[in-house]
Amino acid sequence: MSEVYVSEAVKYVGVDDKTIDLFESQYVVPNGVSYNSYIIMDEKIAIMDTVDRRGTGEWLANVEKTLDGKTPDYLVVQHMEPDHAGSIKILAEKYPSMQIVANAKTFPMMHNFFDLDLSGREVVVKEMDTLSLGSHTLTFVMAPMVHWPEVMVTYESSEKILFAADGFGKFGALDVEEDWACEARRYFINIVGKHGRSVQELLKKAATLDIAMICPLHGPILKENLGYYLEKYDIWSSYRPEDKGIVVAYASIHGHTKAAVQELVQMLEELGQKVVSFDLARCDMAEAIEDAYRYDRLIVACPTYDANIFPCMHDFLYHLQIKNFQKRTVGIIENGSWSPSAGRKMKAMLEDMRELKILDPMVTIKSSLKEESRTKMRELAKAMAEA
């Protein structure tokens, strides 16, 4: 267990997972991930969420050590995704007198995941219901679609702690020193990004609470400068650009599109622009998506392949679509040896997204960059710098 201090009464019992290769079987996590769980020790004892079954053994040992022979009165289930709910059954069977606290949307999911008889043990809570543990009082705040329909968060009023479910989480184990914003942004955009409106609703509710500490289900506990984290979440969930800059996302089969992109990057930098480029066939796709959201402008460059968009570019644009990409300025470069069509098809996918300004000219390269297409690319670079 990572040495994490919450307070005298609130104990951290989570685990780090540093053997996982892909979070949700798709996101690279070079520094692992934490599954956070907490115990509130009071006249009544409440465990706040469980952990992924990958960490069940270590987590149970942490729980038993913290309880020191006591029996928990409640398990509060804020989110049923298996990385947090995976150990519910084993805990419920270990402590048969423990009641399970969750909202009405949670219990049907729980019974879908587990063959578990909870007769007489279900405590169903709704918006702003409270549960007294003694000197600690829990208030339950519904947070549907952040990012599952049953999600709720819990506010403990005596210590002013927000148990935030998947809100304010980040990739990375807790024993790793790294910048919070980078991995929190990559986590948010790729995991929760589609549901910005729901996050905005939760932020409005959070603004009515006096919060001194945020305890998420992934990543470090946030105790200082909470305004910084709240501002980042407001920016990300409202789809506003965080920084000025241009992301150039490209695919290249035999190197000609890549060579054109290298010239384009030089043109943009000579115009004083910050540029970040991604070879979509080789980069971490989640990081490319993250930076597309971070910066205010995007250029996509892609060859035609089977009369369509090259697959990794199609995947990139598909991810932007399903994550609600919007409020950006976009330029398009296509390549094709005999019948370029990637540009038209990329534009169709982009036009399906909200509040995007697609710049002219669309640049068409026929096999390799020539003076005519280079001139058009220079025009696009100028238009992008002025956007």
Image: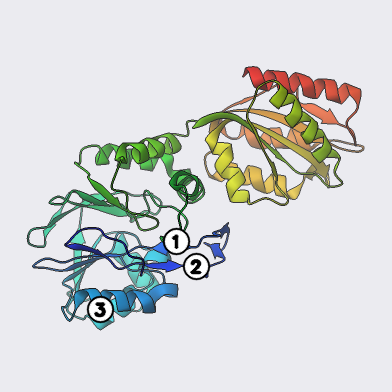
Q: Residues within 10 Å of mark 3 (few under 14, many from 20)?
A: few
Real-space CA distance between mark 1 and mark 3, rounded to the nearest whole angstrom: 22 Å
Q: Nearer the viewer, residue 152 or 269?
A: 269
Q: Mark 3 points at which residue?
A: 64
| Rendered view: 355 above or below 150 | above
Residue at 54% across / 33% down in the picture?
A: 326
Answer with left or right where residue 88 lies relative to residue 33: left
Q: Name the residue under label 1.
A: 173
Q: Mark 2 points at which residue?
A: 18
Q: Please state, as top left, top right, bottom left or bottom right, where the C terminus lies in the image.
A: top right
Answer with left or right where residue 281 lies relative to residue 75: right
The amino acid type found where label 1 is placed reads Ala
Is disc 3 placed on a helix, strand or loop?
helix
The amino acid type found where label 2 is placed reads Lys
Q: Nearer the viewer, residue 285 or 182?
A: 182
Is disc 1 placed on a helix, strand or loop?
loop
Is disc 2 placed on a helix, strand or loop?
loop
Query: Which numbered marker is on residue 66?
Result: none
